[in-house]
Image: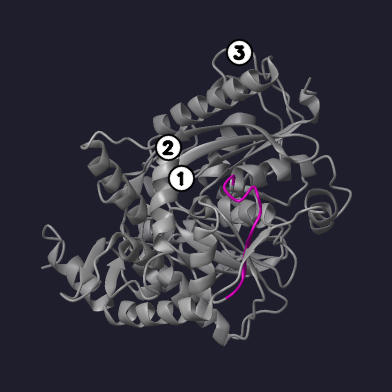
Amino acid sequence: MMNQEKTFLGIELGSTRIKAVLIDENYAPVAAGEYAWENRFEDGFWTYALDDIWDGLRDCFKNLRGDFREKFGTELTTTGAMGVSAMMHGYMAFDAQGELLVPFRTWRNTTTEKAADKLIRLFQTNIPHRWSIAHLYQAVLDDEPHVKDISFMTTLAGYVHWMLTGEKVLGIGDASGMFPIENGDYNAEFSRKFHTLFNNFKIEDVFPRVLNAGDFAGKLTEKGARLLDVTGSFSCGIPMCPPEGDAGTGMVATNSIAERTGNVSAGTSVFAMVVLEKNLSKTHYQLDIVTTPAGKTVVMVHCNNCTSDLDAWVNLFGDALARFGVRPSQGELYDKLYNAALCGESDGGGLLAYSYFSGEPIVGLYEGRPLLARMPDARFTVPNLMRTLLFSALATLRLGMDVLKKENVRLERLMGHGGFFKTKGVGQKMMATALNVPVYAMQTAGEGGAWGIAILASYLKNSDMSLEDFLAKNVFADANPLCEAPDPDDVSGFNTFLQQYDNGLCIEGAAIKKMNCGAYE
């Protein structure tokens, strides 16, 4: 029998799936549920509807409870603590009655170039396009009428937590993607500067209260319990940890929250993070400064695009096979195609691909056009195509990491997690090749941030010790991560591909201008 009071629940709303993971007192996953969803491009913005959020959460939670019932022969009615995580950044603005003023604008939107540029000059620090403050200020610059009615702004994780608990709070890692952080809270000097720029708005009055890992963030209310479980059998009163962003839960899931540690998360987007010992020498537009869930300074290289184009190609192959009456499972399809990439030529056989479904500010492009190009004599084979698509998913990350390297931030290894690593060995090998650094992955790498936020929920019961000590001594004491070291020949092949990729960015720019439906005259 499972003692439900000694379990911990984590729920993460990612870009393509909502996932719930229940862990036991030894931090091992014992039940899981998920729900596939996809963002929409409506009225010029990438978005998810509120109904999509709650329908997805309820379905995901129902699947988790079904998995638990099947394994343990009883209903899941409670848990020791729980937490919510989600994709960071974006724009969710509410009026005084708690009504959403405009549809949720996700991190994927790159419509904030003018606002980000002005804020960078104002603060003398990098403000990426996807950050919440950039979305807000862009709405101001565009004279959007809803701005005057804003009473509260938060992220997706902060919104879900608010609905479940009634608490307007946010974990410091997620908060650091809304507005710059200093000394454990929103940067007071920058807040004053923004108030001078836009005198109707005080950050501290409208943004959620900042909490650290281990802080009590409220309890699941009766209303919140019913939002998750329509049957009425899941208990309210469960303590909740601060809601966090997917970057923070990725750091936790890979034990990468101490200085000199780093991790890479790869799914719909891809980002690498390194916990800093000292500040960077100057501002770089390719590098974000955020924090760990415990408040330590982190440098991040974030790319908006990773696996979306890969997924589209895998689905295309699946559709082609189905027309011949062959219907492999989704897992088998990915495994076969990803492993085919290992048989490709080291440089991808002369193929060139861009995985940009949306804009990619690191290379100065603010819209996306997925592309595949080749010379007539390129070796157009399935292994070369798959290798090229995997390389394309990581090429922009490498360009950003090269900037970090110039700051003398050295990495001896990276911990990987996310859907990119689900096919054993392949994602790791490609990442190690692209970044020329050993890449490690835990057995839980595919569980990603849902497992990470479940760990943060369990930390509520252990917050008398530092988060670093808790992870090192309790959660990862017996961890034996799998390692893929870079192969010099593969690295040389990737560098050849990257040179062509960098040279060919003008092709992507031309596609944006010409495949535009009148957007560019």
Label 2 SS: loop
Q: Where does the N terminus fall, quadrant-wise?
A: top right
Q: CA distance from mark 2 to mark 1?
A: 7 Å
Label 3 SS: loop
Q: Earlier in the sequence, mark 2 or mark 1?
A: 1
Crowd rating for badge 3 (residues with CA inside 10 Å; few <14, some 14–19, many 20+): few
Where does label 3 land, which residue?
A: 232
x%, y% of residue 196? Answer: 51, 67
Is residue 195 at all visible to an observer of this figure?
A: no
From the viewer's side, name the closer residue of 86 and 130.
Answer: 86
Where does label 2 land, which residue?
A: 100
Amino acid type indicated by mark 3: Gly
x%, y% of residue 299? Answer: 60, 71
From the viewer's side, name the closer residue of 512 and 243.
Answer: 512
CB within 8 Å, label 3 to label 1: no
Residue at the spot 83% in from the left edge and 39% down from the top edge: 461
Residue at the spot 54% in from the left edge and 37% down from the top edge: 19
- Left/right placement of residue 506 relative to residue 161 reads left
- The magenta stretch spans which residues? 437-447
Label 1 SS: strand
Residue at the spot 29% in from the left edge and 82% down from the top edge: 503
CB within 8 Å, label 2 to label 1: yes
Query: For the residues carrying marks 3 and 1, which lies nearer the camera in this image?
Result: 3
Amino acid type indicated by mark 1: Met
Q: CA distance from mark 2 to mark 3?
A: 27 Å
Where does label 1 land, which residue?
A: 92
Q: CA distance from mark 3 to mark 1?
A: 29 Å
- Left/right placement of residue 511 relative to residue 77 reads left
